[in-house]
Each structure stands twice: as structure tokens, then as C-alpha cells.
Amino acid sequence: MKFSSKLLHLALAAALCTTFSGCWFLVIGGAGAVAGYAVSRDTFEGVSSRGQEEIMSAAHKVLAIMGTITGEHPREGQINAIVYGNHVTVSVIQVNLTTSKIRVKARNGIFPRIGVAQDVYTKIINQLEK
């Protein structure tokens, strides 16, 4: 086999593997406008161009719909809630005048729940887009 033929087969195999494993969106260039990333096994975070109050309001709406709010600390930029039986903490940190960092942490006891954190984060971002 020629080198170019082997390379073609390798590229085709890699493309098929990523397509069938559910990672095809990474190959295309990302998951769209929801730009966030996992920073640990239980925390998902991202950056928004919205102000802290606006993000806190959106987080409050989302958490009230998805579960029960157990604590709210607006001065600290933090909301605690129970979502799908998991303890969720949303933190909003004002980076500068035009940028805020959103951090969502989800745990069920000692077990991290990154899927719940990502779901809450995505819904907060979608609420901000409305």
C-alpha cells in the first residue's frame, strides 16, 4: 500500500469513529453559541458579556423552574438550589465592566454531576439570549 492510501484510510477511520461516538460537533467546530467548558468533575463554567445582575436574574428563573432554590446571596453572586436531587451552586463573578464568569457546580452527596451542571449552565445562557 502506498503512503497516501494508508493516510486516506486512517483519516476515514478517524472521521467515522468521531461521527459514531457522538463527538462529530467537535470536529465541525464546537457546540454553537454555548461556549463553556468543564473545569473539574463537578463544575462547568463560561464567560458572558452580560452584567452580574442580569445573569443572576436569569439563573434565578432557570433554577426556580428546574428545581427548588435553597439559598440566594446576591452580594456574593451565588445561588444554591436542588435540581433533579442534586445540590447545585451557581456563582457569577464580575470580571470587568462588560464581562462576567458563570460557574455552575453540581453534586449528589460526594458524587460529581457534570451533566447536571452543564444542563443548568446551558439553560442560563439560553435564558440570557431571550
Image (cartoon, rainbow, N blue to C red):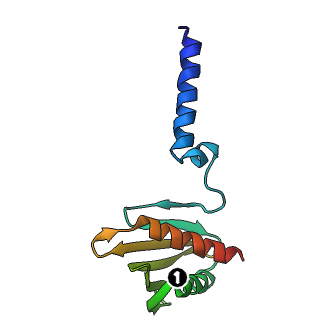
**Front-most of 48 and 31?**
31
Q: Residue at x 48, y 85 (%)?
A: 67
Q: Residue at x 54, y 48 (%)?
A: 22
Q: Which residue is drawn at 33% across and 75% down?
A: 108
| Circle 1 Cα neighbour tier, 10 Å, few/some/many (<14 / 14–19 / ≥20) | some
Q: Where is residue 129 in the image (x, y as percent from the top left)?
A: 70, 73
**Name of the residue lying farthest toward the front:** 20
Residue type indicated by callout 1? Met
Q: Which residue is drawn at 50% across and 90% down?
A: 74
Where is the C terminus found, in terms of image quarters? bottom right
Q: Where is residue 123 in the image (x, y as percent from the top left)?
A: 59, 73
> Residue 4 occupies which quadrant of the picture?
top right
The answer, for residue 98, to whether it is visible in the render is no
Look at the picture and state if 37 lies above or below 103: above
Q: Name the side, left or right, on which 58 lies relative to 84.
A: right
Look at the picture and state if 117 lies above or below 3: below
Q: Position of residue 93 (x, y in %)?
A: 51, 76
Look at the picture and state if 71 lies above or below 14: below
Q: Where is residue 77 in the image (x, y as percent from the top left)?
A: 49, 84
> Residue 89 occupies which quadrant of the picture?
bottom left
Q: Mark 1 points at which residue?
A: 66
The answer, for residue 1, to whether it is visible in the render is yes
